[in-house]
Amino acid sequence: MSRDRLLKERWELVVKKLSDQFADGEPLDLDAIIYLIGIQELGQLHRAFKKEQKIDLMHIAICKLLVPYGYYELDFVDDEGWPHYKVISQLPPLKAGEQAVLMKEAIVNYFLETDFIE
């Protein structure tokens, strides 16, 4: 099976499982999945977040997802439990479609590592 086809199938599985679990089967988009990963990484699952905090959660997720690619590393966790990352390497300039593929690949890898999917 080609790498692109395998990524597509795994991505669809992630979307289905998360959509069933968090959105009554209504398909979640990429941003929603990134947001869920941010909440998971923060570890504060049952609390309300302000708009600015939601953006911060997405930032946490993106950093976490790009750690294996060598773009970020965890710097510290503050007193409120929020992880902070430092830039290790700048992301190359990517077109919107290329960014989406990179994030989908990183998300699939994240959920493979956490045994959410096989």
Image: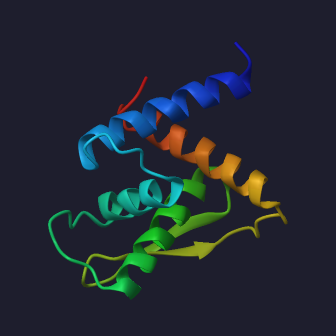
Indicate left or right for 7 with 40 as reference: right
Query: Is 14 positioned to the left or the right of 40 in the image?
Result: right
State the residue in front, 23 or 95: 23
Determine the residue positioned at 42% across, 50% down: 28
Query: Relative to 50, is 103 on the left or the right?
Result: right
Residue placed farthest to the front in the image? 26
Q: Spot the residue most to the left.
A: 46
Residue 87 rendering spot, x and y as whole percentages = 65, 73
Quadrant (top left/top right/bottom left/bottom right) for the N terminus: top right
The quarter of the picture where the C terminus appears is top left
**Is residue 28 depicted above or below 48 in this figure?**
above
Residue 15 position within the rendered picture, expressed as x and y whole percent measured from the top left: 44, 39
**Left or right of residue 37, residue 102 in this image:** right
Residue sticking out furthest to the top: 1
Q: Residue at x 67, y 62 (%)?
A: 71
Q: Is residue 94 above or below residue 14?
A: below
Identify which residue, 79 or 17, lies in the foreground.
Answer: 17
Identify the residue shown where x is 49% and y is 53%. Answer: 29
Write down the quadrant of residue 14 in the picture. top left
Looking at the image, what colour scheme do you see? rainbow
Residue plotted at (20% across, 62% down):
45
Q: Position of residue 58 (x, y in %)?
A: 46, 69
Of 51 and 116, the residue lying toward us: 51
How many marks the image carries: the answer is 0
